Image: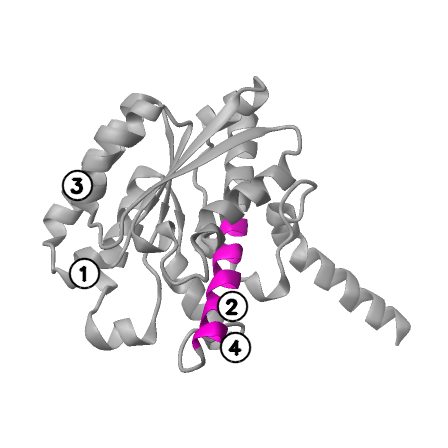
């Protein structure tokens, strides 16, 4: 009986090994239990070469967060609790000797076309090593044609490649109320398809939030404003931690080349 129990324990450890190897290494941010989600929702298909090189050189690593309202702090108790600040904090935990500057270029209601203009005029002149590009819901609400949505993203990726910057996409937020009003499915699929085709990192925030709500880890709706803000703050902290994990993975992949 004891032998059977030992065998089952060893088998469980072997089955868990890939997940531990991916996210359990020294230096990888450890998140609160409620933040956990399937690792397949944080996709890093290639290394972050520019970020890895600047870290290795001991340079200041500039990271630009390009996005819409959630990147600017919409929904959290105070803007300082939005995910970019948590992202920097978790990065510093992963790389205690590293120097990071995280700047946010975000505007509530921004479409991909608006962000593309901001990318050209403000982000690229700042010369970031990494751009975190958060896609909002405005393209869905305004029924921007999928062909235009895809074309603007392609244009942005070409500009970033020409500048030698690493790129990490974040897709839209999940909300039951949003699902009742609009259907973001085609836009989400377009972004996933672009990410696979171009081998660009993608944090599937929509599916991650849906997982959290379905598991009971978070409940963003139907409670008092203070409780909603508390959960929003905690969720932004989780997103920041997942981004730092992805950066860590991207640096490891770049260093293996």
Q: Secondary structure at mark 3?
A: helix
Q: How is the image coloured?
A: one colour
Give the percent coordinates (x, y) of residue 52: 52, 26
* Residue under label 3: 152
Is residue 257 in view from this perspective? no
Give whichever of 228, 248 is nearer the camera. 228
Secondary-structure class at tag 4 = loop
From the image, tell me which residue sits under label 2: 230
* 2 vs 1, front mark: 2
Residue 58: name its quadrant: top right
Depth order, front residue of 187/180: 180
The answer to whether 118 appears left or right of 146 in the picture is right
Please tell me whether mark 1 sits on a helix, a strand or a loop. helix
Q: Earlier in the sequence, mark 2 or mark 3?
A: 3
Residue 206 versus residue 227 in the image, above or below: above
Q: Residue 145, percent across and down? A: 9, 54
Distance between the alpha carbons at the discs numbered 1 and 4: 27 Å
Residue on which the image places disc 1: 140
Residue at x 53%, y 31% (from the top left corner): 100
Identify the mark nearer the N-term, 1 or 4. Answer: 1
Disc on the earlier residue, 3 or 4: 3
Q: Which residue is mark 4?
A: 216
Which is more toward the observer, 32 or 150?
32
Q: Disc 2, disc 4: CB below 8 Å?
A: no
Query: In the image, is residue 231 part of the stretch drawn in magenta?
Result: yes
Q: Position of residue 54 (x, y in %)?
A: 51, 22
Residue 191 percent location from the top left of the image: 27, 50
**Residue depicted at 28% across the width and 22% down the height:** 162
Q: Is residue 96 above or below residue 89?
A: above
Alpha-carbon neighbours of circle 2 within 10 Å: few (<14), some, or many (≥20)? some
């Amino acid at each position: 009986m004891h032998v059977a129990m030992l065998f089952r324990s060893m088998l469980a450890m072997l089955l868990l090994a890939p997940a531990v190897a991916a996210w359990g290494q020294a230096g990888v941010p450890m998140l609160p239990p409620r933040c956990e989600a399937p690792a397949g929702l944080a996709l890093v298909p290639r290394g972050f070469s520019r970020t890895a090189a600047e870290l290795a050189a001991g340079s200041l690593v500039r990271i630009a967060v390009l996005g819409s309202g959630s990147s600017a702090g919409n929904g959290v108790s105070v803007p300082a609790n939005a995910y970019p600040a948590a992202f920097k904090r978790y990065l510093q935990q992963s790389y205690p000797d590293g120097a990071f500057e995280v700047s946010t270029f975000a505007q509530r209601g921004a479409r991909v076309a608006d962000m593309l203009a901001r990318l050209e005029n403000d982000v690229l002149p700042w010369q970031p090593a990494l751009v975190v590009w958060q896609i909002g819901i405005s393209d869905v609400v305004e029924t921007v044609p999928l062909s235009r949505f895809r074309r603007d993203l392609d244009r942005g990726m070409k500009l970033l490649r020409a500048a030698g910057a690493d790129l990490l996409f974040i897709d839209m937020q999940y909300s039951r109320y949003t699902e009742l009003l609009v259907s973001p499915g085609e836009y989400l699929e377009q972004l996933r398809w672009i990410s696979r085709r171009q081998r660009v990192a993608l944090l599937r925030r929509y599916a991650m939030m849906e997982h959290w709500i379905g598991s009971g880890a978070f409940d963003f709706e139907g409670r008092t404003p203070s409780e909603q803000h508390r959960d929003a703050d905690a969720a932004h902290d989780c997103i920041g931690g997942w981004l730092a994990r992805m950066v860590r993975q991207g640096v490891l992949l770049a260093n293996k080349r």
